[in-house]
Amino acid sequence: MIAVLKKDTSEKQLSGLIEWLKMMGLDVHISKGKYQTIVGLIGDTSRVDIELLQSLEIVDTVKRISEPFKSVNRKFHPDDTIVDVSGVKIGGGNFVAIAGPCSVESPEQISEVAASVKASGASLLRGGAFKPRTSPYDFQGLKAEGIEMLREAKKATGLPIVSEIISINYLPLFEDVDLIQVGARNMQNFELLRELGRIKKPILLKRGLANTLKELLMSAEYIMAGGNEQIILCERGIRTFETYTRNTLDLSAVPMLHELTHLPVIIDPSHATGKASLVRPMALAATAAGADGLMIEVHNNPQKALCDGPQSLTPEQFADVMKSVCAIRAVVAG
């Protein structure tokens, strides 16, 4: 349920309303926009007398929210959320490019890639230190050593770092990671999501390979319910009957999610297609569709990559993609 307040509502009146609603056992979410203030009621709203709430002097309108996701709902928060990742803003018109290798393999590899993607316009450096793999025999990442290599690359380039967490147990290692990624396999790891809701660090939440947008938003709701509102959603392709691509990129997710939620939405064309040759056209299409950013895998030697080489771009290919992305953004903005 939401209550839209009248423009002349004072802070004292707002505080009184919040206190009254909390006395009924409800959580209250306040969204102050440019033109109106919205009070979101979270919890068992059946005890709220809508007519009584509507009759209050400061209340303009009252509406029930039918969707199960509340805090992430745009009806609760009409203005776009802008997520700040160590000074890099995402959402609300702020576009970001996140680039780097699927997995951190060596200090030389990550430092070389970091320098090249920064020169091409990337604002954040991605790199997997922990790699959940389908086969137990595949490379699983360098773990703590990989995190340390990312930290060194950050010192050298100034790029904030992004890396995937696979377990609550590893959370202490992510203290210096600027943006914690929840991968597709962990999208519904609710214990992990609850824990990430308790920390004050931005979260990149990837859509599961067989999950609906509603389920993605409910996973984001888990994080927000814990108090962490700094969430970026990522569409990375879903599994369909198609076999020519690794997954099927759901570009309609971008405008649909923007309609449903105030959270920023980015696209990962690398995992979506699994083919380096398809990354550029899908990146351009995502940009034209209104995505708030891109997450692209870049490796200095894709043929020898320990993980996801076939979908990784070379630094030169990434630079070409970024030039075209800038051109598309200029057209969309114009």
Image: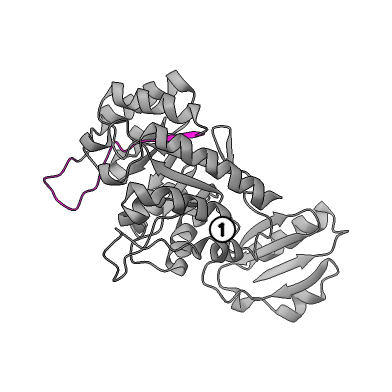
Q: Is residue 278 left or right of residue 304?
A: right
Q: Quadrant of the N terminus?
A: bottom right
Q: What residue is rendered at 63% in x and 66% in y? A: 41
Image location of residue 285, percent across then percent down: 51, 55
Most foreground residue, 15 or 82: 82
Most foreground residue, 328 or 52: 328
Q: Is residue 101 left or right of residue 43?
A: left
Describe the colour scheme in one phrase.
one colour
Image location of residue 206, percent across then percent down: 41, 54
Q: What residue is rendered at 27% in x and 40% in y? A: 130
- Look at the image and give the residue range highlighted in magenta: 122-139
Three-letter residue code for mark 1:
Ala
- Name the dominant secondary structure of the magenta segment: loop
Image location of residue 199, percent across then percent down: 46, 42
Q: What residue is rendered at 28% in x and 42% in y? A: 169
Q: Residues within 10 Å of mark 1 (few under 14, many from 20)?
A: some
Res 152 quadrant in image: top left
The answer to whether residue 18 shows anywhere in this view is yes
Position of residue 256 relative to residue 182, above or below, is below
Residue 181 in the magenta stretch? The answer is no
Position of residue 152 relative to residue 12, above or below, is above
Image location of residue 181, percent across then percent down: 40, 45
Q: Residue furthest top?
A: 156
Most foreground residue, 183 or 100: 100
Q: Is residue 55 left or right of residue 44?
A: right
Res 109 quadrant in image: top left
> Which residue is under mark 1?
289
**Mark 1: which secondary structure?**
loop
Residue 126 in the magenta stretch? The answer is yes
